[in-house]
Amino acid sequence: MNTNSYKLSLKQHNNQTCLQLHQNGLQIRKWFGSFATMVFNRIIRKYSTIKQSQTTAYLRKNQMHGLFTEVTCLYQQALCHYKVEQDLIKIKPPKNYCCIAESLLLHIRMNEIHPSHDDLLCFFLDVYQNRDYKIFSETITLLLNHNLIQVINTTCGKIFYDKNPEPHDHIYFKEHDKLVDCDNETSSFLESLTHVKIDTSDEANIYCISEIK
Ligand SMILES: [Zn+2]
């Protein structure tokens, strides 16, 4: 590898996709989730002559400007597509919370998962490396108070966030520590099974599945 080259690699990190940019083995930037995949695919398409594999691409120094222009452009398009700017303008977050609220809400809306509190905190610490926990938790509270997301507490003490703020049933897979949406047909089926624990303490149910045989 030429010393002027930059390496983009798509990996799984803490249960999610992560795109890392390295220069001479030193990591200089990271992107996460669907956004990471979107950036990687765009760069592969744009610089089709670069040496690449399914998950790795090498860029030259003079292609760095193009990379960051694409990242900025894709980020703005995503903010608009997922109506993040539109909803945050309505709630007028304090200035120092704007970028964090934007990036957390976009991350939650773009990805087809219910992120756990720990997943979201890891994302925040990776993106805003010098920030403290207080600003993270205050931003989450702001999004919750304005009904832009909802929080789901499982009986095992696990906390998840949901882009859909309306009450709806969920299934919690204890061993995998995953929360997924549950439609009416699945709810009826799970209610007929004797070994499924049902948490009915909230407006919607959480079906807790401990083991899949
Ligand atoms: Zn949900």
Image: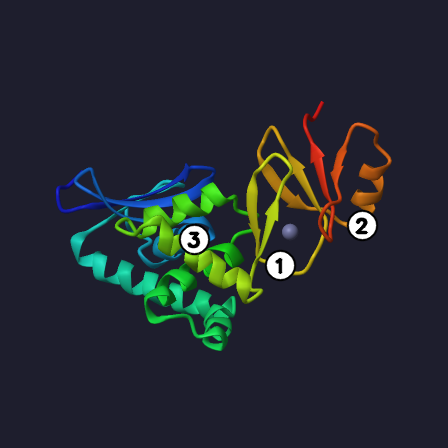
Give the percent coordinates (x, y) of residue 72: 33, 65
Residue 76 position (above or below residue 191): below
Which numbered tag is attached to residue 137?
Answer: 3
Q: Residue at x 48, y 63 (%)?
A: 142
Instruction: From the image, state whether disc 3 or disc 1 is nearer to you.
Output: 3
State the residue at coordinates (61%, 34%): 156
- Quadrant into which the C terminus falls: top right
Query: Is the CB of mark 1 within 8 Å of ligand 1?
Result: yes
- Disc 3, disc 1: CB below 8 Å? no
Q: Which mark is residue 184?
A: 2
* Amino acid carrying mark 3 in the image: Ser
Image location (x, y in percent) of residue 34: 47, 52
Labelled pair 2, 3 in contact (Cβ < 8 Å) = no
User: Secondary structure under badge 2?
Assistant: helix
Task: Kindly report which numbered mark, 2 or 3, lies closer to the viewer in this rendering.
Answer: 3
Q: CA distance from mark 2 to mark 3?
A: 33 Å
Is 211 situated left or right of 71 in this image? right
Place residue 10 in its image quadrant: top left
Can you say whether 81 is above or below 112 in the image? below
Colour scheme shown: rainbow
Q: Are marks 1 and 2 in contact (CB under 8 Å)?
A: no
Q: Which mark is residue 58?
A: none
23 over 164 or under it: above or below: above
**Which numbered marker is on residue 164?**
1
